[in-house]
Image (cartoon, rainbow, N blue to C red):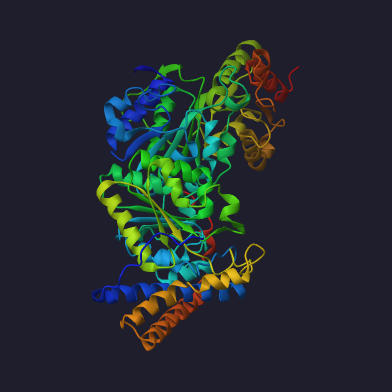
Amino acid sequence: MPILTYRDALNQALREEMERDPNVFLMGEEVGVYQGAYKVSRGLLESFGEKRVVDTPITELGFAGVGVGAAMVGLRPVIEFMTWNFALLALDQIINSAAKMLYMSGGQVPIPIVFRGPGGAARQLGAQHSQAFESWYAHIPGLKVVTPATPADAKGLLKSAIRDNNPVIFLEGEMLYNMKGEVPEGEHLVPLGLADVKREGSDVTIICHSKTVIPCEKAATALAEQHGVSAEVIDLRSIRPLDTETILASVRKTNRCVIVEEGWPFCGVGAQVVDEIQRVAFDDLDAPVIRVTGADVPMPYNKALERATKPNVDSIIEAVKTVSYMD
Amino acid sequence: MPTPPTSVPALDRSRLDFYRGLLRQMLVIRRFEEKAAEAYALGKIGGFCHLYIGQEAVAVGSIAALRHDDYLMCSYREHGHALARGMSSRTVMAELFGKATGCSRGKGGSMHIFDASKGFLGGHAIVGGHIPLVTGAAFAIKYRAGDQVAVAYYGEAAVNNGAFHEALNMAALWKLPAIYLCENNRYGMGTALERASAIYDIAQRACSYDMIAETVDGMDVLAVYEATARAVKRAREGHLPTLLEVRTYRFMGHSMSDPIHGHYRTREEVDEQKKKDPIPALFHRLEAAGLMTQADYDALDAHVLAEVDAAVKFADESPEPDADQLYADVYSA
């Protein structure tokens, strides 16, 4: 199987879907001539022309709305935000227009659109460029929220998102673009709403998504090797719809759970997952569920302070030890 | 307010049916809105309800210049546009009543009237929020090499927000077949235009985008029709957008919860504007030209009143949405 970067896997998904369906087009800042701020759209302008790879002014509200308007009359736009930080300016179009149009029109006007771009913190980009917004969008009925953690999932989920008839919030990991992995060729579709058990285990469930999958897998390896703990690692892949079936099956098996996310703790993704678990599988739990999250602060610039905000292998291991009543 | 620089088009006697149609549509909207106000007072209509009384010539004149496959999007003051677009008064009234028979199945309400089959793509309730959507529909038209037109209706207060600026800039930059029809009724809720905008003449905003603009007398349905027809021609034939500033006036309060004049305008001002009421204005022109008599008008009005009464009866007697509709249409299959 070919080895691709996460970036090139996304590029392949875009290329294949644009070849398959002439209604699919890509629009955003620097997607064309510049080849993409993160080079996800490299070569697409040359292949598909200016009509289908559309450079926009710096106007997130405006071009998000243009995408929704085009979707209202039958096109299937892929709207790239250079980063999800800038999409705050487009929230009115995402929430008030895209998410609600089908419902408030009594089912008449579906919005098949993908909003995509990098989310989460990178390295020392400071407070306004280092934010994980999954929980914001997942709060909104009418939106789907997808967070691929691997190159194969990046391709398979993006292809499914483009074919979905709903607005899909597609949050790529800014730190994952260079990650390499096996990516199936051609028709590789990963359904939205299906978690992936990255590693099977019997003692504790570690739930994660996007780039926290990497430290969670490392933590699971260390737990097995150094502490004799068998951890099951679940990559949610989709935040909404949430694969509660896979989550609950795992927790019923392990009886212990740690939830890891890069975002802030208050009203975070993990808070929703905890709710699902305690409501349905309370009697299966041998310990309270613990969350490992980003620190509840705006992102500091200083390297050491920034590192201190992020979930890491050690903090995940500590959480597992806590729910396992070790130490 | 200075008189807009538009001439009054001469009546063409061969187009009597067209004129009567415009008059009829304006009357339908007027009587519909009067009935909506009554129903609101009776608690049959909830939420916010923004009436179009006084502005009828804008929707009627402009929509008459459109084709059946063109796209329209409006603000939340859109009952009149829906009716002018040919949606039945029954389905619109039923939507106001929140009934299952409403155009949006009772889930949209007064501010979210939709009929996709007529290209009527909504009332939208965030000021200016739908203007980029219209740019998007126009983008799609050009993408498919079509010759349709996309029209945005919004009030003058919307031109001060970013969505308007961003949407018009892109439409001009990309030469999209859109018409940005500003219904300048002089007040954004209770804030007068001159208290909100550094530029009084909205049409001047088009200079920022190198876009063609016209200022039109919105109390003259034929002037609105002619100006829109020119904009439609530019859009269809040249994929060029237009900013139309249509000067009109709202005879009622901002919404049903406001008094007619409030603190922000005087009764005298409202009374003065009512002298320009577009409905008698058209009728008197037809009458003066010998094309219509008072008896004709009264018969037409009676007919319209009967239609609107039937719409109210239909809405009142229609069923509520089924409880299981609560979770329907959150997501598309």
Q: Is residue B328 left or right of residue B235?
A: right
- Residue at 66 percent across and 42 percent down: it is A279
Quarter of the image holding residue B69?
bottom left
Quarter of the image that includes the C terminus of chain A: top right
Quick check: can you spot residue A96? no
Q: Residue at x 51, y 37 (%)?
A: A145
Q: From the viewer's perspective, is residue A188 above or below residue A106?
A: above
- The residue that appears at 71% across and 31% down in the rendered structure is A286
Q: Which residue is outermost to the top?
A: A226
Q: Nearer the viewer, residue B32 or A107?
A: B32
Q: Give the farthest residue toward the bottom.
A: B295
Q: Nearer the viewer, residue B259 or A197?
A: B259
Quarter holding the N terminus of chain A?
A: top left
Count the labels in the image. Answer: 0
What is the x, y in percent for residue B226?
32, 62
Residue B35's spot in the image, x, y percent? 52, 76
Inspect this view and state whether residue B246 appears.
Answer: yes
Q: Residue B29's quadrant in the figure? A: bottom left
> Against B321, is A256 above or below?
above
Q: Position of residue B82 (x, y in %)?
A: 42, 64
List x then y, in percent, for residue A276.
62, 40
Q: Is residue B258 left or right of residue A172?
A: right
Give the camera-side residue of B172 and B306: B172
Q: Is residue B209 above or below residue A171?
A: below
